[in-house]
Image (tube, helix red, strand yellow):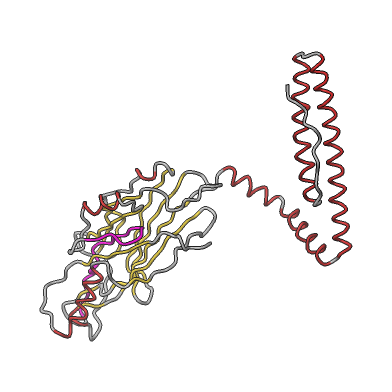
Amino acid sequence: MSTASAPRLWIQATARKAESRQVGPEALGTVFLATLASSGVGALIKTAADRLLADNEFTLSDTLAFDPAFHAAQTGGQGEFLVSAITLNVGPQAVTLEPDGQLSEATVIGAARAGIPVLVRVEFVPSLDGTALAGRVTHWVYQGCLDARTALRASQRKVSIEIKITDAAGASLLATAMQVTATVNTLAKARPAQGERLPWARKPGAVAPAGAVDGRFGPVNIQVRITEAAAPSWLGRLLGNTLSAQKAAVETLVKDAVTQALDPSAAAQAQLGSIEAAQTAWTAYATAHQKAAAAREAFDKAGSAANQQALVLALAVLAERLTLAREAHGRAALTMQSLPAVAAP
């Protein structure tokens, strides 16, 4: 499936301020990079949206390359985790954060008016003993399904947003998720545990390596995945079961088509079978037409309720026979001329 029109997911990370320090010329590059990352203009590893994982699941994912993520007072010391909040939105561009990385209410209102479908912010709060972090959903705007496919799918959606922070080697440092379940029409009003803590996770830790500039170190990847899942509708399940039950018939059909393509006599025999089927369908149609014409004549002579009902039924049979005859003629590549219409009562 093409992803040219897929919505884009934007990720911005806000870093907590480390203790103040004097910035020398050798540290200016690192400070500049940290400022960019904190403002959400950090390096983005943009990946194509995984539009379709399964018939009933839509996924949008992206990764933010964030650097640096830790601060240590001295080389070899335990680093303080700097990421304090993650803001994500779906739309043509990233929403604008305040200079300190905060998300203002004016920005939230403006994004809603601009039709930004998704705007979510998660802030990380430390435990009292400082050993764990828990996400807290401070903003949740989900104005409608990102996936517009509705055919053969139930109206209820389960929306989940997963956030995972990994180090450069791919080891998980912090992971959290939030989820809501609602119908397509009520999704905009659904809310996760907004303002409440998500489950605790061990606070990421790392030791500052030798040569870490200005006490800051540790690039991380911040991965975000939005998933909308929907169960198949009753019609979808019916079609799936029907196709499964007809697997042998489909395989036979394919096999016959290949045989006909390679063997002219087999193709001629198949065409003859189609013509004979069209002939049979025409005969049944002509018989139904005669019965309908006779029912019409009987109704014209004595327009009783019984005669009217007989005519209605005869016309219904005639309509179905006409449809079958046209389909049979089409499969045989033949032109069919319909008989004169019989008037309804």
Magenta span of residues: 77-97
Residue 68, by quadrant, is bottom left
300 is higher (above) or lower (below) than 317: above
Residue 108 coordinates in the image, percent (x, y): 26, 52
Residue at image position (19%, 66%) is 16
Relative side of 239 to 32, left or right: right
Q: For residue 129, what is the image quadrant?
A: bottom left
Q: Can residue 96 be found in the magenta stretch?
A: yes
Residue displayed at 11% across by 76% down:
21
Q: Position of residue 297 (x, y in %)?
A: 83, 20
39 or 53: nearer the eye?
Answer: 39
Q: Nearer the viewer, residue 171 or 14?
A: 14
Answer with left or right where residue 325 lies relative to residue 239: right
Percent of width and height locating residue 246: 72, 51
Q: Quadrant of the C terminus?
A: top right
User: Can residue 60 be found in the magenta stretch?
Assistant: no
Where's residue 107, x and y in %? 24, 54
Q: How many marks?
A: 0
Does residue 91 lie above or below 291 as drawn?
A: below
- Report whether 117 appears left or right of 212: right
Q: Nearer the viewer, residue 172 or 295?
A: 295
- Residue name at image x 23 percent, y 86 percent: 211
